[in-house]
Image: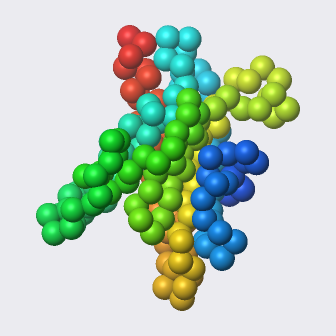
Amino acid sequence: MSPSLYSNIKSCVSPEGSLLEKYGSVADYHDCFQLKTSRKTTATAEQPLSAKLFADAFFSSSHFRPEAWLLSMVTMFYKPPSSEFSYASGIFRVIESNDREIVLDTGGTQSWLCVQPSPAGDNDDTSEIVYQFGSIVNKSDWLVRLLIYPHTLYAKYLLVGAVQQHQQENRNKSH
């Protein structure tokens, strides 16, 4: 894992007006992490930013591969509800998306991915890309509270893997 990327991850709240705001309740566990990278390493005019491409990178990254394998084993015994569009053996169902954001549902959790240029106030030339990954766990009981710390470490690990995969895919497309 790239130490420089990992050390640049910040906890944040999901932006006001984001798709994630529509889901969960005050009693649920919420988190959001963001990572800013140079636009030069991420997208060009030929490869514009896209939530779908970021989600594709997230679920195909080497960091997600062990979870994907585990979920494929789960689906041998549990068939998730059908969905028009999903990831990871159908476990992560897309419930809403737009150009910059995508919300996925597993039944007990929602995951949110967002990719966008850095807001003008952060950087005048918008030369940075902001990647965000958030989660909602719909039942905040003792087990959820016990697993929050490992979850946050894993969420950051997944975010770094997705960003690296997204950057690599864009570099490959530009050559």
Q: Is residue 69 left or right of residue 84?
A: left
> x, y percentage for residue 2?
49, 46
Q: Position of residue 60 (x, y in %)?
A: 33, 42
Q: Is residue 54 above or below residue 21?
A: above
Q: Is residue 119 visible?
A: yes
Residue at 49% from the left image edge and 72% from the top image edge: 150
Residue 124 point in image, percent of width and height: 83, 23
Q: Nearer the viewer, residue 94 or 56?
A: 94
Q: Residue furthest left?
A: 76
Residue at 54% over, 15% down: 44
How many numbered marks, from 0 up?
A: 0
Q: Quadrant of the C terminus?
A: top left
Q: In the image, is 162 to the left or to the right of 48?
A: left
Q: Nearer the viewer, residue 21 or 121?
A: 21
The answer to whether any part of residue 9 appears in the image is: no
Q: Quadrant of residue 67?
A: bottom left
Instruction: Please give left or right for residue 87 compared with residue 36 in the image.
Output: left
Q: Which residue is at a point 37% across and 53% down the rendered structure image? A: 92
Q: Quadrant of residue 172?
A: top left
> How far from the left and from the top, in percent, is residue 110?
50, 59
Scheme of image coloration = rainbow
Q: Quadrant of residue 131?
A: top right
